Image (cartoon, rainbow, N blue to C red):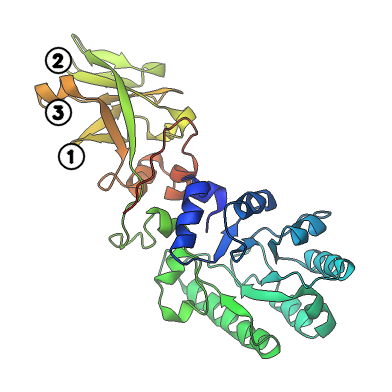
Amino acid sequence: MVKADAYGLGVAKVAPALYREGCRDFFVATQAEGVRLGALLPDDARIIILSGVRPGREKECALAGLVPTLVNTAQVQSWASCCRALGIPAPSVLKMDSGMGRLGLSAREVRGLLAQPELLKALNPCMFISHLACADEPAHPLNQQQLSLFSALAAEVRAVLPDIVLSLANSSGIFLGEAYHFDLVRPGAALYGINPEPENPNPLCAVVQLSLPVIQIRHVEKDCTVGYGAAGKMPAGGVMAVARGGYADGLLRAQSNRGSGEVAGVRVPMVGTISMDSTMFDISALPEPQRSEIKEIEVINRNLTVDEVARHAGTIGYEVLTSLGSRYFRRYLKT
C-alpha cells in the first residue's frame, strides 16, 4: 500500500525501495496516484487503483496500464465496454463487500458475474479482494464472519477463474493468522511503523523520526500563560523552548497541552496551543548544560511512537503520518 504519498512519507522514495525488496503489486487510491507511481516503477510492477475508475476515464486508465478495482456494477459494465472497444484484455480487480459496508460488490452481484463468461472475459479479472473492518480487534466476531463469507465466495470465483489471486488481509489482518492470508496480503500502516496489533507491543520497527529545530529558549521569571487563548501555563523558574513546526506542518492541534517531545531520552511536555508555525515545550526537566545547547526536539521516534502521538491527539497513526507537511526536510536512510 503506497496510497496518500506512501502514507505521507514520500512515494518517490518508498515505492522504488519496496520494488527493490521484491514487491510487484502496488495499491494506490486514485488514478492520479497511479499515473505518478507508474513513472517511478519498472513495467513489471502492477499498479492497482483501489477506488476504481471514474466514468469517462476508463480508456485513459487502460492505456496507462493501470488496474482498476471494480466495486459496483456500473464500473463493471463501463470497464468491459472500454476493453471491448479498445480490443485489449486490460486486467481488473473485483472487490466484494464482505462486511466493511463501504466499497464492493455484494455476494449476489459476484455470483451474477460468474454466470456471465463473456462479461468475465472482457473484464479479465486478475485479483479478487475484500477488506477487513475490525482486524485491529482480534476478538471481534466480524473478523470470522468476513473470513467465512470471503472464503465461500473465493472458492466459487476460483472454480470459474482458477488463476485469480485472492486477497483479504490488510496490515492488522496479516496478524490474525494464516487463514486470512490467501495468495496476497496488503500491508499498509504496518510498513510505516504503525502498530497492527494495538492491544500488544508493536511487532514491527518504527521507521519515522521527526525533529523540530529549536529557535528560542525562554527563561520564565514569573508565572505566565503560554500561547493562543492563554491555554498553557509555565511557573516561575521554568525554562521553555520554542520549536519551529506547527499545525501547518501536520502537528495535530489536538495534541496541545497533551503531547510531548523528547530530548536525549527525556520527555518534554508541549505547553499551550500548537500554533501554525511553532510549538512550545517545557524543558525544565533537562540538566542546565543541555538546555542551553539544545538544537532540536524529537516529536516522533522509536520511543515516542506514531501510535503514542496519535493517542495524545485523540486520533489514529494513519492521520499522524498522512498529515506530515511539505515544509519538512526529509532524509531517507538505507539500513
Q: Residue at x 81, y 75 (%)?
A: 122
Q: Amino acid at mark 3?
A: Ala
Query: x and y percent of residue 312 in the render?
Result: 35, 41
The residue that disc 2 covers is 237
Query: Disc 2 vs disc 1: Cβ atoms closer than 8 Å?
Result: no
Q: Residue at x 46, y 45 (%)?
A: 9
The residue that disc 1 covers is 265
Q: Residue furthest bottom?
A: 159
Q: Amino acid at mark 1?
A: Gly
- Nearest the camera: 84 or 276? 84
Q: State which tag comes first along the sequence, 2 or 1.
A: 2
Q: Residue at x 60, y 66 (%)?
A: 44
Q: Amino acid at mark 2?
A: Gly
Could one spot residue 29 in this view of the protein?
A: no
Q: State which tag comes first along the sequence, 3 or 2.
A: 2
Query: x and y percent of residue 101 in the render?
Result: 63, 64
The residue that disc 3 covers is 285
Q: Residue at x 60, y 78 (%)?
A: 165
Q: Judge the density around disc 2: few (<14), some (14-19), many (≥20) Cα neighbours within 10 Å.
A: few
Q: CA distance from mark 1 to mark 3?
A: 11 Å
